[in-house]
Image: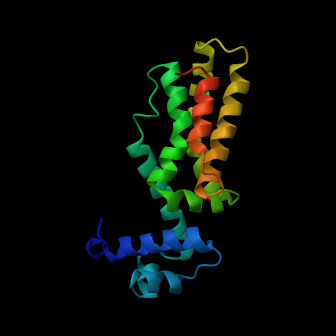
Amino acid sequence: MKSSLLSRKEKILEAALVLFAKNGYADTSTKEIAANAGVSEALIFKHFGNKDALLAHLIKSGYRRVLQHHRGMMTYKNAKDFIKNMIFLPSKLVAEEPMFWKLQERLSHIPFSKSQHEQFMKPVHPIIIRAFKELGYENPEIEAQYLLLVIDMLWKKEACGEIENSIDLALLLEQKYQLL
């Protein structure tokens, strides 16, 4: 959406996301957000109450967008397709919303952010176990745990720009699990 068409609230959210992702939550003031959004600082407080609530809104709305846009990918059709979708999901998510995932990576140790991510991933774990069982893996629980750890590492490394070959790694996982 063009910046001129954004509501003032959307401008605040966009500016906050970019600044929080770039500078960190603690090192970003509401004054900076207001200046970058072209609004008054008071308007931030009117819409969100405080900086913590603004951050919470960004995180919750980010996960809502992910769930809306990727519901089909996260739907279980068959074991191979589900695991394949999970392998490629991190790259897809980071490519679509790099600032949101950079913010999440920066805040991954903060309890609220961590709990939102865990809530997002929680339903996936038993489905991955089910998929590995259906594919006849000897220890589906360990395979699921391993895959989720790799996926978690991939999106974090990609979000902060520490890895450029995440697709190659995903392809390696696809080959490892014989999903071709």
Spot the residue most to the left: 5
| Residue name at image x 44 percent, y 34 percent | 73
Q: Residue farthest to the top?
A: 136
Residue 77 visible in the displayed image = yes
Apparent side of residue 11 relative to residue 118 in the rendered image (left or right)? left
- Residue 147, placed above or below residue 166: above
Q: Residue at x 62, y 71 (%)?
A: 24
Q: Residue at x 50, y 70 (%)?
A: 18
In this rendered view, identify the residue nearer to me: 60 or 84: 84
Q: Residue at image x 57%, y 60%?
A: 102
From where the camera sits, is residue 123 visible? Answer: no
Give the answer, above or below, for where 46 lies relative to 110: below
Where in the figure is residue 13, as x and y percent of width and height?
A: 43, 70
Residue 91 percent location from the top left of the image: 53, 45
Q: Position of residue 39 (x, y in %)?
A: 39, 85
Q: In the figure, residue 174 lies in which quadrant?
A: top right
Q: How is the image coloured?
A: rainbow
Q: Nearer the viewer, residue 5 or 50?
A: 5
Q: Is residue 114 left or right of residue 99?
A: right
Count of marks, rendered view: 0
| Quadrant containing the N terminus in the rendered view | bottom left
Q: Nearer the viewer, residue 65 or 119?
A: 65
Residue 167 percent coordinates (x, y):
56, 41
